[in-house]
Structures are given as C-alpha cells and as structure tokens.
C-alpha cells in the first residue's frame, strides 16, 4: 500500500481510537450522561450530578408556581415508580399530563433538578383512538 | 369504496412483486428474454398499483373518511385542506406508504431512463428492487396498513386533527423533500449492487450514477436544511441542530453521499477508487435504512422517534440482509475492482479529494458512534450512557474547520502532483486575505475565541480561493471574446459540474459563517406586565400590551413588544403569540398550547422571541428572548447549496 493511503488510514484509526478513549475509557462527564430508570434512582441515596431519565408525566402532578410561572414541579413515572422533578424555564408546548418526557439534571434527595426538559417531538405525533371523539 | 380500492391496490402490488420474482427465476432457468420483459412489466405494474393506493389514501384524507383509523388519527373536519394532504406522511402507516410511493416514482424513472441505456443491469436491478419493494409492501399490508378501518363498535364523529406544530409550511414540505433524498439512495444501491454483480463498474456506470447521486444529494441537503429551518422557526429553543439520533440519521448518509460525489470524480477522470465508490454508494443506502431502523424501532431514545416498536425487528432483518448482500458481492468481486493506478502525491487534486473523503468518513464515524453509544455502552458495561451535544461539537467542530480549509485548498491543487512553486503562487493571495481577516478580528472583537477565529480564517481563505478560480475562468473566456457579459455567460454555461461544485462550496462556507455566530448567542427568560421593560444584551424590550383573539382553529394571546437599541433608537415591534389549539374542546386534556414565535431577522443578527406563558389574572407575560448572530447566513448558505447542486446537475452543452 502506498504512503498516501497508509497515512489516511492511520489518521482515521487515530480518530477512532481517540473517540473510543473519550467515551469508553475516560468517560468524560462533559460528554456523556448516564440514563437511569426511575426505579434505580428511587433506590439511590446519594446525590448524582448528571442524570437522564425518561418517563410519562403523572396526571394531576403538574404544580406551577403562581408567583413565577416558569417554575414547575411535577412527577415523572415509569410503571409503578415515580420521581419528583423541578424545572425553571420555558416548558415545551407538548408538556402536559401523560406526555412522554426526557429530563436531564442533578439528582439529590429524591428530586431531580432539571436543566433540560424535552417532550416527544411533534413530527412523530402518534395520536391514538382513545383520543378520538366517539360515541 | 375508494378505501377498498386503495387496500386492494396495495394487496395487488404485493402479488405483482411476487410474480416479478417468479419471472426472474424463470428467466434465470430458461434464459428466455420474454421473462425479463414480463418481470419489467410486473415491476412497472407494482409501482403503478402503489401510486394508485397512495392516491386513494389521499382522497380519503381529503374527504375526511373517519372510518379509516389513519384518517381519524391525523385529521379532523377543522384541519385545513393543505394539512390534510400533508397528514399523508404525518404518521407511521401513511409515511411508510408515502415512502413506497416515492420509491415507485424513482423506480419508474430508473427503468425508463437509466436501464434503457445500461441494459446489462436489468435482471439484477429488478431482483434487488423486488427484495426492497417486497419488504416495504409486507410492512404496509400487514404491520402498518393505512387502510385499516376503525373498530366496528366505534362511530367517529370527528378525528384527532393534525398536531399544531406540524401545521407549518416548512414542516409540510420538509419530510417529502427529505424522503426524496433518503429514498433516492435506493437507486444508488440497486445500481451499484447490480453493476457489482455484473462487473459493470465502468465509465458508463459512474457517469450515470453520478447524475443520480447529485439529484439525491440536492434533496437530502435541502431536506436537512429545511428541518433545521422548521426547528428554528417553530420549536422555540432558538437553535436548528441538536444532534438528536433522528437528526443524526439524516446526516450520516449525507456525509457518505458527499464523500461519494467527490471520490466519483476521481473514478470518472482517472479510473481509480472503484472499490471505495462501490462501498460509499452502497453504504449510503444502508445508513438510510439504519437511520430508519433507529427512528422506527424505539431502540434509541429520541425525542423524534415513532412509538410503534413492532417494526424494529423487521427493519433490523432488512438491514442485515442489505449488509450481507453488499459485502458478499463486494468480497466476491473485489479483484475486479482493484485499479492499477494509485494516488502517489499528498499535494495532488486526487489527494485533496481523498482528504475530503477521510474527513467526511471520520465525521460519519463520530456521529455513528455517538448515536449508537447508548446501545454500545449498555452492551459493554450494562449502563446506558447518553452522549451529549458537547461530544459531537468537541469532536466535529475542529474536523469541520479542517474541511472548510480543504474546500479552499482543493481547487488550488493540480492533478497528479502540485509543484512547490505552484503551491506557493496559488496559496499566496488566500493566505494574505486570511491574515488580514485574522488581524481585523483581533482588533475589533473583545476576548479571543479560538474556534470562531480559525473558522473565520477558513471562511476567508476558501472564499478567496474559489473567487480566484472563477477569476481565472473568466479571464480565459474574456481573452477569447473580450465582452464582459459574454465571458460571464460562457463561464456559467461551460463546465457546469465544476462551477456548480464551487457554488455549493460557497454555500457551505456561508453555513460556517452562521455556525460561527452560535459562539456569540445570548439568551434571557423574564416576566413583564404591560408598560414594563427590561434591558438585555444592549437592547431594551418594552411590553406594550397583551391582547386576545379567537381565530378559526385556535385562540391566541398576542403580545406587543417594542425593541429599542442602546442609543434609544426604535428597532422593531415583536408580536410573539401564545395559542391554544382545539380550545373549543370541553376536555382541557385535548386543548393544545402552542407558542408562535416572532423573529426580527437581519443579516447581522436575529432577535428571537418566545411567548412562554401568560397569567391573565395578574396580567403577567413570560418571555424567552435570544439574540442569535448571523443565523440568516445558514439559510442563505443552504439556498446556495441547493442552487449550486442543481446547476451542477444541469446537463452541459455538447461542446463540454
């Protein structure tokens, strides 16, 4: 193999190794965040600086601060397990009871202080027949 | 009645694709040309049946036939006619039929225009098409049938209606354009695999597939940029790219196809890199299916992904089939693809194309690794680890800047080898221009930021290098015919591939101008009552009023906010709205709030306003304001990319 091809393959190999090192070996906190299930977090007694959790918003659990409407508390649940979340910021439009959300933030004392709150994207809005007006 | 015809057409299409298989097997056994003609007709009839089924579904959406589950789920009597059309691709079943519909149109064009010229590829093309169509027809007939009726014990009075976020013109055209890009890669795959099996990876193949690749690339690029534009205009988080798995799924094939478009030039000019081109063209489609698998399987958590998970195993099996087919024939015929000639110099035009390929493949790997990392980490350590935006930015930004410089370096290199004197003479002016830009940046900006600084140098370097190339072409035409307009006309009408490519490169450079702006964004969330104001990022935001209005399909709270600059000069009035769709519904669950943004957009910066929330009792309005510098350059760059690509695709005159 000539020197041009060898050099290019070498450079590609180095980038691949560097990528794997950053994510798998170094486990850089700025780059990665671990997914937890709600059950795992409810059993956790120490605080964790970065967590990511997905689930549904527990019906009737949304509590908006009347004096600062950007502040909200709600419960996110998966099956039987639920966890309280605090978020201060603009909420996505699809944020409502039973909406599917992904929250990222700090976990401490059974509370997630979320810095990021996402709902399922509207481009994949899957209505179901239970929502259809029917007689 | 029409829905029955549509359902029947889908079933007939399955039967026809099965008969295509039988005719092809008969041809294989008997070598009777009649059967290859029959398989062709059967293939064409399959496509026509699918087109008929799609028209039937569209008809049912337009007349609001709520006896069909799909129509009831995605439309209502209130849904405007235009969005009834777009709801064709709003859900799983409709979008799968729409996918097959576009594939049918592409297939018909391929049969009538490409296979008529390269007849040797007919048999294998039909065979591969039959596998692909077979797969999608199984999905549409048995897994996600858009003609599925609602349960007989339910009488639907009105449908769900289309999500308000999708009731936007950009969102209406973004999916079909992206689909045109995604599905167009099917042709690249079929053509490559058929040519690989038949040992037809030759000059005619590369000329023909390059035209297909250019048009597919144009749609893919336009689709990705429109997706970003929609997110920016509609979603209210102020950005256009979030490195979400679904976004990444469209970016990976784009990287591969871009690499293919560049490396195919080397095969066309010098007959080299056949193995590489075969891999790139095939992998582009494989990555499209991988992306579709990610989107529709639920294997990776994404804010975009479809909820139905039953498609996952089927897509996975299809993906494995494609990979096995490709690599089986690749290794079997590898010896037929190896070229005698090799690229020997680092400073050659061919070398430049190879660096481009290296960078694009590296970026594709980084995105693939980051996208699949939750699965990889779970398999590796049992813990599901999410990769954040920092990972993608930290790794891709420096590589992207390198690519930016390379777009300027490439045109300055000669084929085979560039001599040192040519290197110095060609690089001199772009280097000086970058140096001047760097000095101006240091003088006029507060605080040094490395990446924006280097990116600005790259932007100026590349734009100067491309301008020099255009100047050289202009001078050459002018010397033959000393008329300014004639020289411009000749410049544009000759060598469209090359000039179109340069226009695309200018477009990508302009995208980088927009990317640099992201480093200087500012954001604030605050609450105001009418008459109050707030100072932020050298602007005063004064809320004049909040009014309300009942409209056809929503109720709106409309804010009226003046923006004044630091010298007390009026800039604009913003009218962001908080809307409640389906507000007439007695069940609050079914009402859908939606923030309609207002953006004051200039070439310099955007003032981006979101009306987050409103408390009518206290008369307090909550806002998010962002100052986003240079965003418009992203859209201008996107338009130039599409125009340049179309220009390159446009056939050259015979003299070329």
Image (spheres, rainbow, N blue to C red):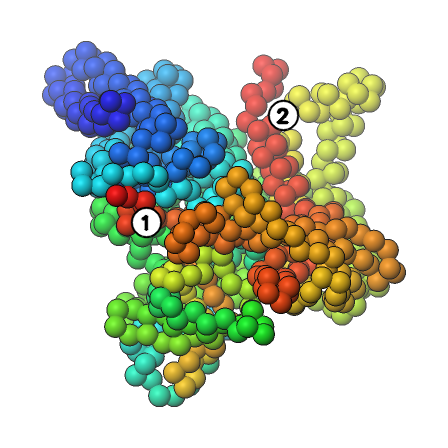
Instruction: State left or right for residue B640 relative to residue B565.
Output: left
- Discs 1 and 2 carry the same chain letter: no
Q: Residue at x 66, y 60 (%)?
A: B626
- Position of the N terminus of chain B, as image quadrant, is top left
Find residue A131 and name its label.
1
Q: Is residue A21 above or below residue A134?
A: below
Near-viewer residue (B265 or B212): B212
Near-viewer residue (B409 or B72): B72
Q: Residue at x 43, y 84 (%)?
A: A108
Residue position for label 2: B495
Q: Is residue B244 above or below residue B348?
A: below
Q: Nearer the viewer, mark 1 or mark 2?
A: 1
Q: Say which element carries label 2.
A: loop
Can residue B293 be seen from the camera position used here?
no
Residue B476, x across and y down, in percent = 76, 25
Find residue A31 and name its label.
none
Q: Say which element carries label 1.
A: helix
Q: CA distance from mark 1 to mark 2?
A: 58 Å
Q: Residue at x 22, y 35 (%)?
A: B149
- Position of the C terminus of chain B, as image quadrant, is top right
Near-viewer residue (B46 or B475): B46
Residue B236, x across and y down, in percent = 57, 55
Q: Quadrant of residue A32?
A: bottom left
Near-viewer residue (B438 or A17): B438
Q: Is residue A90 above or below residue B555?
A: below
């Amino acid at each position: 193999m000539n020197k041009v091809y060898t050099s290019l393959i070498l450079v590609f190999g180095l980038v691949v190794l560097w990528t794997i090192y950053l994510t798998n070996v170094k486990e850089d906190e700025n780059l990665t965040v671990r997914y937890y299930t709600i059950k795992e977090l409810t059993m956790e007694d120490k605080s964790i600086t970065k967590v990511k959790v997905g689930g549904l918003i527990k019906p009737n659990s949304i509590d908006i601060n009347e004096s600062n409407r950007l502040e909200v508390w709600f419960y996110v649940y998966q099956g039987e397990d639920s966890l309280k979340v605090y978020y201060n910021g603009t909420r996505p439009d699809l944020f409502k009871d039973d909406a599917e959300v992904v929250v990222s933030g700090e976990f401490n004392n059974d509370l997630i202080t979320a810095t990021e709150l996402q709902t399922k994207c509207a481009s994949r809005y899957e209505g179901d027949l239970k929502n259809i007006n029917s007689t | 009645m029409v829905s029955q015809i549509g359902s029947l057409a889908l079933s007939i299409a399955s039967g026809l694709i099965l008969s295509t298989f039988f005719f092809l097997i008969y041809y294989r056994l008997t070598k009777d040309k009649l059967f290859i003609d029959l398989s062709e007709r059967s293939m064409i009839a399959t496509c026509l049946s699918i087109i008929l089924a799609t028209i039937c579904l569209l008809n049912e959406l337009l007349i609001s036939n709520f006896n069909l589950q799909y129509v009831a789920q995605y439309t209502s009597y209130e849904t405007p006619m235009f969005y009834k059309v777009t709801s064709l691709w709003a859900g799983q079943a409709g979008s799968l039929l729409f996918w097959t519909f576009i594939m049918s149109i592409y297939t018909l064009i391929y049969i009538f225009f490409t296979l008529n010229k390269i007849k040797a590829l007919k048999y294998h093309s039909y065979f591969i098409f039959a596998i692909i169509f077979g797969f999608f027809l199984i999905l549409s007939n048995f897994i996600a049938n858009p003609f599925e009726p609602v349960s007989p014990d339910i009488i639907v009075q009105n449908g769900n209606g289309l999500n308000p976020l999708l009731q936007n013109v950009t969102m209406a055209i973004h999916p079909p354009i992206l689909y045109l890009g995604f599905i167009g890669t099917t042709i690249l795959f079929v053509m490559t695999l058929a040519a690989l099996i038949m040992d037809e990876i030759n000059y005619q193949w590369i000329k023909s597939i390059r035209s297909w690749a250019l048009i597919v690339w144009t749609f893919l690029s336009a689709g990705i940029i429109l997706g970003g534009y929609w997110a920016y205009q509609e979603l209210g988080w102020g950005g256009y790219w979030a490195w979400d798995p679904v976004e990444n799924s469209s970016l990976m094939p784009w990287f591969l196809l871009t690499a293919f478009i560049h490396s195919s030039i080397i095969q066309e000019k010098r007959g080299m890199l056949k193995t590489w081109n075969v891999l790139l063209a095939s992998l582009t489609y494989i990555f499209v299916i991988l992306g579709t698998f990610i989107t529709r399987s639920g294997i990776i958590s994404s804010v975009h992904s479809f909820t139905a998970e039953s498609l996952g195993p089927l897509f996975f099996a299809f993906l494995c089939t494609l990979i096995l087919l490709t690599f089986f024939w690749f290794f079997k015929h590898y010896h037929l693809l190896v070229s005698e000639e090799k690229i020997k110099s680092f400073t050659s035009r061919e070398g430049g194309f190879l660096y481009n390929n290296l960078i694009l493949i590296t970026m594709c790997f980084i995105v693939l690794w980051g996208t699949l990392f939750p699965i990889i980490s779970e398999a590796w350590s049992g813990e599901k680890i999410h990769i954040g935006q920092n990972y993608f930015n930290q790794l891709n930004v420096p590589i992207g800047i390198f690519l930016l410089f390379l777009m300027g370096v490439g045109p300055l290199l000669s084929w085979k080898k560039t001599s040192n004197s040519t290197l110095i003479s060609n690089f001199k002016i772009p280097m000086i221009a970058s140096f001047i830009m760097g000095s101006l940046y240091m003088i006029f900006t507060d605080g040094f930021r490395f990446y924006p600084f280097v990116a600005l140098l790259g932007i100026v370097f590349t734009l100067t290098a491309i301008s020099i190339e255009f100047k050289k072409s202009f001078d050459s035409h002018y010397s033959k015919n000393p008329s300014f307009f004639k020289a411009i006309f000749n410049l544009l009408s000759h060598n469209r591939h090359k000039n179109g490519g340069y226009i695309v490169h200018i477009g990508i450079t302009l995208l980088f101008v927009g990317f640099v702006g992201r480093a200087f964004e500012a954001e604030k969330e605050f609450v105001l009552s009418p008459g109050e104001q707030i100072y932020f990022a050298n602007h005063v935001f004064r809320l004049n009023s909040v009014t309300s209005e009942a409209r056809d399909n929503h109720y709106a709270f409309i804010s009226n906010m003046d923006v004044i600059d630091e010298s007390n000069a009026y800039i604009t009035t913003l009218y962001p709205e908080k809307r409640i769709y389906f507000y007439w519904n007695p069940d609050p669950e079914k009402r859908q709030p939606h923030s309609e943004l207002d953006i004051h957009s200039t070439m310099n910066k955007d003032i981006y306003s979101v009306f987050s929330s409103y408390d009518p009792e206290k008369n307090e309005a909550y806002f998010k304001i962002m100052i986003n510098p240079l965003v418009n350059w992203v859209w201008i760059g996107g338009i130039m990319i599409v125009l340049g690509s179309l220009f390159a695709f446009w056939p050259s005159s015979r003299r070329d």
